[in-house]
Amino acid sequence: MPHRIEVALKPHIPDSHGIKTARRSREDLGLDVSAIRTIHGYLIDLELSDTQLKAFAEGPLSDPVTQTASVNEPMALNLLRDSVFPWDWLVEVGFRPGVTDNEGRIAKEALELVLGCRLETGAGVYTSTLYCIMGDLNRDQIEALAGRLLANDLIQRTSIVTGNELEGIWSGDSNTFYSVPRVEGDAAVRIQEIDLAPLKDEELQALSRERVLVLNLNEMNVLRRHISRPDIIAERKKVGLSGRYTDVELEALAQTWSEHCKHKIFNAVIHYRNDETGTEETIESLFDTYIRRGTAEIRSRLGDDDWCLSVFKDNAGVIRFNRRYDVAFKVETHNSPSALDPYGGALTGIVGVNRDPFGTGMGARLAFNTNVFCFGPPDYNKPLPEGLMHPKRIFEGVREGVEHGGNQSGIPTVNGSLLFDTRYLGKPLVFCGTGGIMPREICRRPGYTKQARPGDAIVMCGGRIGKDGIHGATFSSEELHEGSPATAVQIGDPITQKKMTDFLLRARDLCLYNSITDNGAGGLSSSVGEMAEESGGFELHLDRAPLKYAGLQPWEILVSEAQERMTVAVPPEKLEQFLNLAEKMDVEASVLGNFTNSGKFHCMYNGKTVAYLDMDFVHNGVPTLELHARWSPPRFEELVIPEPEDPGDLLKKMLSRYNICSKEYIVRQYDHEVQGGSVVKPLTGARDDGPSDAAVLRPDLESFEGLVVAHGICPRYSDIDTYHMVCCAVDEAVRNAIASGGSLDRMAGLDNFCWCDPVESEKTPDGQYKLAQLVRANQALYEICTTYSVPCISGKDSMKNDATIGGVKISIPPTLLFSVISWIPDVRLAVTMDAKSKGDLVYVLGTTYPELGASEYYALHGFTGNSVPRVRIDQALSRYRCLARAIRQGLLASCHDCSDGGLGVALAETAFSGGLGMDIDLDAVPAEGIERFDTLLFSESQSRFVVTVRKENRKSFEEIMGGTGWALAGKVTDRTELVVRHGGRTAIKEDIYDLKDWWKRPLAW
Amino acid sequence: MTPQVRVIVTTGYGTNCEIETAHACRLAGADHVDIVHLSDLLDGTVRLGDYHFLNLPGGFLDGDNLGAAQAGAHRLRNARIADSKERLMDQLLGFVENGGLVLGVCNGFQLMVKTGLLPGFGGNYENRMVSLTYNDSGKFEDRWVTCTASPDSPCIFTRGIGKIELPVRHGEGKFVTLDSSVLDRLTDEKLIALQYVSPETVSPTQDYPYNPNGSDLAVAGICDPSGRLMGLMPHPEAFHHRTNHPQWTRRKLPEEGAGLVFFRNAVDYIRQNLS
């Protein structure tokens, strides 16, 4: 018989979680909820004495100062009986079997200390939250509350009762509050063999679909041809296999050949036709042609000064940082899982990308996180397609997931963005990035290299394997549909991971392993498979892998994406020391086999071979796609509105657009200064609330050298032309970094493409256009990166960001996130964006053109237009070089990049962040072809800045900037007013605190 | 030969401010600073008795599951040193008895109140009288606050501090007591070493966000009656250099971060009192 302990805050302590939940019930769901109090439930699946239960309840589970605990007694009934809190409904939310329950795991460890012994796998503590809800709600409403706010049916179970019902349940024979969510199931192991030989084309496709292999017909045929080769069959017979694939092999191949892992679209042969120019060309791999080649050209130009160390080949890109350290940086997306379970998906996203730099070279110590989220509008009020969550719920879930993942891991979140567009309703984009530093030399080898050797043990460290995350790699290569498997959802466990990284960094410095990589998409199949390329093969015993619960089939063990695991190659002579250290530091480490040089991908289960494939076939056998792309530029209606009568009012409206307004709500909830190296924080200025352009940090506290981290993203421009979208995204990232003190002398980029499916098919009739958008995006990336000399060092693509729900297809706008990392020789040279003091001169750098196409200003009026901003790359380059020099000489008081909302927004932000006014004469600003004030004010022309300079630096500053297109446009005042003159009259005169209030209000939740 | 000041900074199980804490101790003049994983204490490799000053840094012990530092405090009270009957807590009590200094920041403060190390009324260091619970805002928040130190508190760490700005970064920092008598006793014994104040009036405040969590009596940190044990929610180690301050590009600040004073006071005290 299990036991149940409940813990609640004492009545006089405010239940802030309950209060917040009640508020959201009212505000987000419009339900008449007057108050909520929460209770924690712990279900203990173990025989315990009363004394033990009491010690457990009153020891680790409750705080005697703030909480009370009950043992096998329903605390909610006491609340009713004592009239402490006369609730109307009780909703209990617990996890479904097999879902990661971090609190349950910690409670179990605490129980082990109470009992003084280790508990076996299986015996466990399961947690739940009980919401005691006061409010005038009927059953339908309470169910809506449970389903739309309190619980996610995919991973959680709920029970809803009234007081009478609760009393009945507790006095009855079968108390449902004692039902343990244990994983039950058939533990029998079966290896299935699949004979592809007799299958017809349709049957091959059906097999791919039913097993969620997500392989196309051509790929299935390659698989069939391969296994029918007599030499292959003969070899397989020697290890007890036949001319049929085992399920283990088929799953491993599907995983390795997935779009997610093989980037088949980026490596495809593309026939590209441009109707605008009437040209046609064939591109052999976008990746090789535009991305890899661009980086190679920049590196060869750098020659002996090449500071790129490891690009595109490892889990993260690595560049030189300082005399002691190199820096690794990677950005990933976790879109599909975040659509299904925003909290778990995003949490897994952040702790997952942490493992990329951690698994690069010999391993990096993690120094910073970045996050960019794209959601539907939080106030979306039209009916949602069945199966989609409301964007605000996704927002809150993702925010909290990343909060828990980043904060608990002790990694500062230094930089990020939030974007809103209705097309992200179907799939939110959740970009998570992590950078880390590694010693330049580890165990007398460059830290960024690694080499598993034949004979090294395959050791898996960290978490255990469960069914969670099975088919993650293949699933993310597919669009969402109603039957998407719940096993694709996982919940990360930052503390298990933190314990593991603490241990592995120590093992690294003791030279206890030769190679390391993370278990992310594709699980062991991917991690061991990739490391085995270093040695030339492997032999893996799947039965030796530690499981969360019985009942996993061998193929599931191989491809499970259960989190918090790293695989390392440990030389035999170091194995004992490695395992002893793991045990001491409370980290599970299991020897699963050996790396070999056999050339084989070899898996066994209980001594029997269950997979035997050529490494070469697994890694290089996937056939190249051949695709068609065709570009013809779209034409949109031009905006026709009269010139605004009250530009000040318009500026306020612009400042409170979701894409422009303050993101302080989310920024404050992320720790952005842990590790003590924060220099330019995400919020800055006189009241710590101005929007910084980039982060500056000092990852090595022994040195004043720093990193500048920034990004650019502008998906709206894709509506007109993805070529310009990419140029603008890269330019935005670069100018953000320059504005804060970065330099083009050492700046590297990461390209993260999130696209809608660009492969023409019945479901995607406009595939050729979408693919042309991808081609143009890559052409732009090559052009601008090589001109700026910003090499891409790593990247990722996520190509199926569509959702078909209830017959409605929602595709995201093609989105590129471009992240940059740059080096600053002394962080004390960094500049922030806020106006500093009265009398400082205000300059506008860069020319404004009539470029309102797909701007925030046009979006405000519901138009797209056609005049998309274009980057004049050469002009921008000389401006950036001059500006960086001026900053290095300490000549700037403030520097702010001009992006969404143009000059108007940048001027307002500079003023109100500094708590100072500004007098600006816009007639002085460099402009070409501008006829209207609103165009001048809100045009989103690229490569511009608003900067302030102390009077005494005027001459030096102007000399350095030379002929790069700038103007002295006014000065900083202490009148707390933004005054903008145009055409000889005062066009705007607004109080800066009023402007700031408009800017802060939209997301001040 | 001048006596060597030896400092230990613990880590492991979710602690994450150990590097900057150790850095702050070195900048403050400590001669020997070790970052020690709890497992090295638990297997007897390292003993607290070899040090003068114990730092319990911030972080998320066990992910703050079961409540901030609840599981961590439970481990400290129950886990035994390998091959002995000695609890880690016994070693810690011995360290305190022998005149050691303990500074708990954020999660370290939570750990100190949840083991009973603070407030340590009458020298009883295992009695839980106060706690740190969920912020009134219901949110984890990273923001800089202004605090003042009580000049008549016995606290060693806050000596000479008038007003100081530091960051808070927590979701569970609201200081509460078992009952009002505990609060009275803290006041009477002058154990409220640090309070959140309004930057304008420089007096203790209950107003958000100056008091970021709704702490009773605006308590930001307390000490034990000996003054050698202190816990606080703000992070002094996160202000070790002027560039840590969110407004360093606007103000003239001394090169050294103001937060170092806590560590310098500790190091100076040890140097003066070393036999």
Image: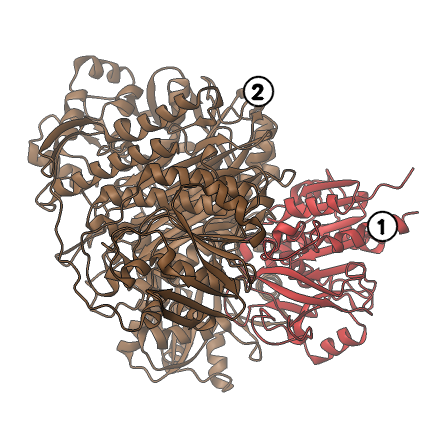
Chain colours: A brown, B red
Q: Is residue A948 shown above or below A545? A: below
Q: Chain of mark 2?
A: A
Q: Is residue B229 shown above or below A801? A: below
Q: Position of residue A122 (x, y in %)?
A: 45, 49
Kind of residue at disc 1: Ile
Q: Quadrant of residue A440?
A: top right
CA–CA distance in space, label 1 to label 2: 45 Å
Q: Quadrant of residue A642?
A: bottom left
Report whether residue A478 is seen: yes
For label 1, the SS is: helix
Q: Residues within 10 Å of mark 1 (few under 14, many from 20)?
A: many
Q: Position of residue A409 (x, y in %)?
A: 52, 48
Q: Which residue is mark 2?
A: A573
Kind of residue at disc 2: Glu
Total marks drawn?
Answer: 2
Q: Quadrant of residue A158?
A: bottom left
Task: Check if mark 1's residue and mark 2's residue have beta carbons within 8 Å.
Answer: no
Residue A40, labelled with which disc? none
Q: Which residue is mark 1?
A: B270
Extreme residue toward the front, this view? A984
**Looking at the image, which is closer to me, A44 or A963?**
A963
Extreme residue toward the bottom, this view? A83
